[in-house]
Image (tube, helix red, strand yellow):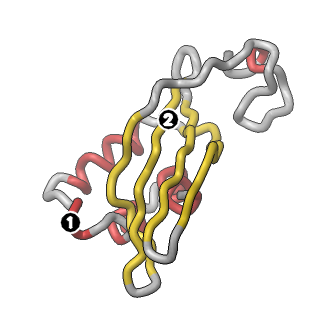
Amino acid sequence: MRSRYSAFVMHNISYLQATLHPSQRQPDDLLNLQQTMETTQWLGLTIVDHAETDDEAEVEFIAFYVDNPIGQLHERSRFSRQQGHWFYIDGEFLPPIKLGRNDNCICGSGKKLKRCHG
């Protein structure tokens, strides 16, 4: 999950396509990824929970992005390992978490949320 988040931040479309399970690939994936990358500035990633077996994994995460207020992608993702490589299968969207104005900002600035991205 962390590697796919990093690929979104770094605009590494080829990695995102390569780590998407072949059964989930669509003809418009490239266009959708490009549009997402052009319009989204990611701020941080929090892994909430994960469970893994030899060939399957689930990761619950929250990816934060610039919006007013901060936007969240809260998801439980499913992955499958095939021939030693992990592939993203799909995800279930979950409700956003409540951020406190006096919490530290998730961007890592060290400032309070209200003084940074709040």
Q: Is residue 95 above or below residue 29?
A: above
Looking at the rendered structure, the secondary structure element under dot 2 is strand
Q: For residue 81, what is the image quadrant?
A: bottom left
Image x and y of residue 70, in percent: 58, 22
58 or 113: nearer the viewer:
58
Looking at the rendered structure, the secondary structure element under dot 1 is helix
Residue placed furthest toward the front: 53
Name the amino acid, label 2: His
Q: Identify the residue at horizontal 50%, vertical 35% (top origin).
A: 74
Image x and y of residue 4, in percent: 49, 59
- Image quadrant containing the C terminus: top right
Query: Can you tell which mark lies on residue 23?
Result: 1
Name the amino acid, label 1: Ser
Kindly identify which residue carries mark 2.
74
Image x and y of residue 12, in percent: 45, 61
49 or 6: nearer the viewer:
49
Q: For residue 116, what is the image quadrant?
A: top right
Q: Residues within 10 Å of mark 1 (few under 14, many from 20)?
A: few
Q: Identify the residue at horizontal 45%, vertical 31% (top origin).
A: 94
Q: Is residue 85 above or below residue 88?
A: below
Q: Earlier in the sequence, mark 2 or mark 1?
A: 1
**In this image, 33 relative to 31: left or right?**
right
Q: Identify the residue at horizontal 81%, vertical 26% (top origin).
A: 104
